[in-house]
Image (cartoon, grey):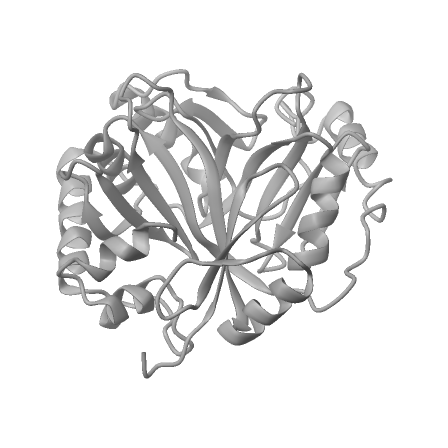
Amino acid sequence: MERNWGDFEGSKTDRRQVLQALGLIATGAFAASVIPKAAAAFAASAAQSAAGGGKAFPVTTVNHLALAAANYAKSRDFYVDLFGMRVAWDDGKQCALEFGNLTSPNGMYIRSLANPGEKPTVGHMAFGIPNFMSQKAAMKAELERRGVKNIRPDGEKGWSCDDPAGYLLNIWVPEKDKAMFPGAAGPCAVAASEKCVAAWEAGQKNIHAARKPSGKTFQPTGYSFIILNVPDVPKERDFYRDLLGMKVVSDQSQGPDGECSLRFGQNTLVLRKLGNPADKPYCNRFGFAVKNSADAVEAELKRRGLKPEPDSEPSFSWNIMDPDGYQVGVSGYVPTTL
C-alpha cells in the first residue's frame, strides 16, 4: 500500500501477521487468531471506549466510493474490464458498480466532473451497516450526542454527515436496495415513492452499455486500502473506531508521518496525516484485494500495458493509474510461507 508497507517493514508489528490481518495471505481470513497482539489490544480498547462513551454501529461494507471522472463511461469500462465489476445502475450520465458478495456488495459510484479541468478526487464514502433501518433513529441520536456535523437524511435508508475532518460520509444499509443509487437522496426521501421507483428504473436502461472484459479479469473481494488524508489522525481513528466499529490493525498515528490502518469486513481504511494541516481532507488512492495469485496479477497488468509498479517486497501488490490518474493498488494472494 504505497509507503505503508515500508512502514510495516520497519515497525515492531510482524509483517506476516499484518498481511494475514489484511486478508492478503491465501489461507488468512480475517480472524482474531491472526491479528497481531498490538491490534488485538486496540480492538479491546475500542470495545471499552464504545461501552463507556456511547453506542457503536459497526460497518461491514463500502457501499461506494464516489469517484469524479473526466468521462464516466471510460472510467466505468476500465473497472468493468479489469476487475469484472458489475454495473448495477447507469442513467447515461453516472453509474454504480459493485463487486464481491451479490447481496451485500462493495462498490463505487462514478460521475463525470462537474467542471472540465477539475482535479479528480473521491468526493465521499458510503459505508454499509447491518440492520440499519432498525437502528436508524438510535444512530442519529448517537451522531448528535457526539456532535457530528451536517447530519441529514440520505434518502429514507441512510444518513449523511461529516467526519471530524469535514469529509463527507454516507451511512447506509449494506444490502442491495432499489432506493440506493447515485442521486437517490432527493427522489428517495420515501423509498416506495413513484419518484424513487422511476429514478431507479431510469438507471436500469443503460446497465448493459459497459464494454465487456477483453481478457482475464481480477476478482476483487474488498478494498485492500482506501487512503484518507486528514489533519488529525488520532481524532479520525477514534471516530471510525468508536462510532463505526472499525478494528485498528496498525497504529503509527503519533509520528511525524502519522498513519493508522483500520479493518472492517473485507476492507481497510488507512488514515494518513496531511503534509499541511490546513489542507482539506481528500482521497485519491485506493486498492483492491483480489482472489488471483500475485504472479497472475503482475502478468495480467503487464499484458494490458498498465505499467505496474511494485508496492511491496517481496512483490504481491502493484500500483497502476486509472484513466483519471487515481492511484489504484492491486494485491494478489501470497504464499503462507512468506
Q: Position of residue 106 (x, y in %)?
A: 55, 50
Q: Nearer the viewer, residue 31 or 224?
A: 224
Residue beneath the point at 66% across and 24% down: 113
Q: Nearer the viewer, residue 69 or 242?
A: 69
Q: Position of residue 316 (x, y in %)?
A: 44, 68
Q: Relative to residue 61, is residue 238 depicted above or below?
A: above
Q: Quadrant of residue 67?
A: top right
Say whether residue 227 is left or right of residue 332.
left
Say whether residue 126 is left or right of residue 48.
right
Say whether residue 53 is left or right of residue 99.
left
Can residue 197 be seen here?
A: yes
Q: Position of residue 157 (x, y in %)?
A: 55, 33
Q: Position of residue 102 (x, y in %)?
A: 63, 59
Label total for image: 0
Residue beneath the point at 41% across and 16% down: 150
Q: Relative to residue 255, is residue 141 depicted above or below?
A: above
Q: Quadrant of residue 227?
A: top left
- Quadrant for the C terminus, please: bottom left
Q: Relative to residue 33, is residue 281 depicted above or below?
A: above
Residue beneath the point at 25% across and 23% down: 146
Q: Nearer the viewer, residue 322 or 225?
A: 322
Residue beneath the point at 34% across and 44% down: 270
Q: Nearer the viewer, residue 77 or 176?
A: 77
Can residue 127 be seen here?
A: no
